[in-house]
Amino acid sequence: MTIQGGVLIAYCILMPVLSIFLARRFAWAKFLGPVLLSCGFGIIVANQPIFAVSTELAAIMTKTSKLISQITIPLAIPLLLFQSDMSDLKTQGKSSIISFFISVFSVFLGTFLVFKYFGGQLGPEGGKQAGMLMSVYIGGIPNLVAVQRAIKASMDSFVIVQSTTMFVSTFYLLFVLTLAKPLLSKIFPAHPDPEPFHTTDELTEADGSPSTLKQKLVHGGQSIGASILCVVISAGITIALTGKAGSLGVVLCITTLAIIGSFWKALRDIPTHEAIGTFFILIFCVSAGTQLNIQKLLASGSLFLTFTLISVVALLIIHYALNRLARIDVDTAITMSMATMFGPPFVPVAVQALDNRTVLLPGMTMGFLGYAVGTYLGIAVGLWL
């Protein structure tokens, strides 16, 4: 670990604390919320004008950000799922499945229509790039890797698709964290049975009485310990079955074990799960923001960036129009869009912004389905176009 990497890790840990403090003290910060503030603090690092980020430093930042995501997301997922209610799948199942497949169809149709308009300008690998773009926006980066190898696209195409989709997705993420629900609630039905999250300053006992500092420390240790145990067991199972601890296999195993753990009342009733899980999510948001270098991205491939931007606008219009026609509630429509465009790791981020933990489990479940669908569709479209 380099000194620069250590400094970045410390920054990613301290900025969520500042974000929570600001959100408690100031109305403007409360409106933005800790998640968006944390993303902003990361973006500031990547785009500050004070000193130039050398190639070596950029590589260190990327490596450190990847390390942070590999630690925080696996630890956050079980903490947010331990308190899940399996009845959410029963009550949300139909609308979640409908919304998910609407999202898949929207990605396909939106990208295809835009490609037909000016896909020829993208060059000889334009069709492959469109297929890879679909794989990302239905599943995630693991799909992009699989599709790139399957259709034998160049590494240059891989880098362009990865960087542009990350850039455009960031703006949609900011929209979800700020204006999405207030705006869409005006035309979409409300969620029938929302369940708010516990905030970091509302830690209570299971019976509702305030926790003492000692109780908070004990319960916090229990939460972190249970999460670490879940991650270790999941990594062990994944290695035993596949021979390596691949991120997709580990996350899938973590989610499964966390859902199983939610049936254990003693574990489910620990009151610190959500607060600590949320803090891990905020750390991840800061680190993710450090990877958004706007100037570097604009120089890497402006034509495909334009193609991606128009495709995303088209697919989102189709997604929300069809969800409205199907009378899907606003929280489910947003969550399923996030589950496909970003994958399961980002579902907790969206659910935190929506302040409705009821859609967390359906979102995670459909997100994993997106991994499978995204790979198959991405390969088929990449070979077809």
Image: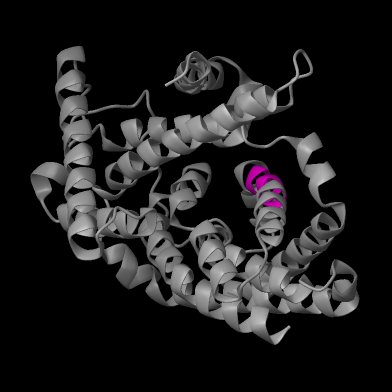
Q: Position of residue 151 (x, y in %)?
A: 60, 76
Vertical placement of 8 versus 140: above or below? above
Is 260 or 133 nearer to us in this picture?
A: 133
Horizontal side, residue 279 vs residue 222: left or right: right
Residue 2 visible in the picture: yes
Colour scheme of this structure image? one colour
Vertical placement of 15 versus 312: above or below? above
Is 150 or 268 nearer to us in this picture?
A: 150
Figure label count = 0
Residue in view at x 46 percent, y 68 percent? 371
- Choose top left, top right, bottom left or bottom right for residue 237: bottom left
Is 71 or 363 nearer to us in this picture?
A: 71
Q: Position of residue 265 (x, y in %)?
A: 11, 48
The N terminus - image quarter: top left
The C terminus - image quarter: bottom right
Residue 31 visible in the picture: no
In the image as oriented, which residue stretches furthest toward the bottom? 384
Q: Position of residue 144 (x, y in %)?
A: 57, 63
Horizontal side, residue 121 vs residue 67: left or right: right
Residue in view at x 38 percent, y 73 percent? 93
Is 149 or 380 nearer to us in this picture?
A: 149
Vertical placement of 110 versus 86: above or below? below
Residue in view at x 42 percent, y 53 percent? 194
Horizontal side, residue 173 vs residue 101: left or right: right
Main SS category, magenta section: helix
- Choose top left, top right, bottom left or bottom right for residue 130: bottom right
Q: Which residues are magenta?
A: 168-175
Residue in view at x 20 percent, y 64 percent? 241
Q: Position of residue 261 (x, y in %)?
A: 16, 52
The answer to whether residue 276 is magenta is no
Vertical placement of 157 versus 300: above or below? below
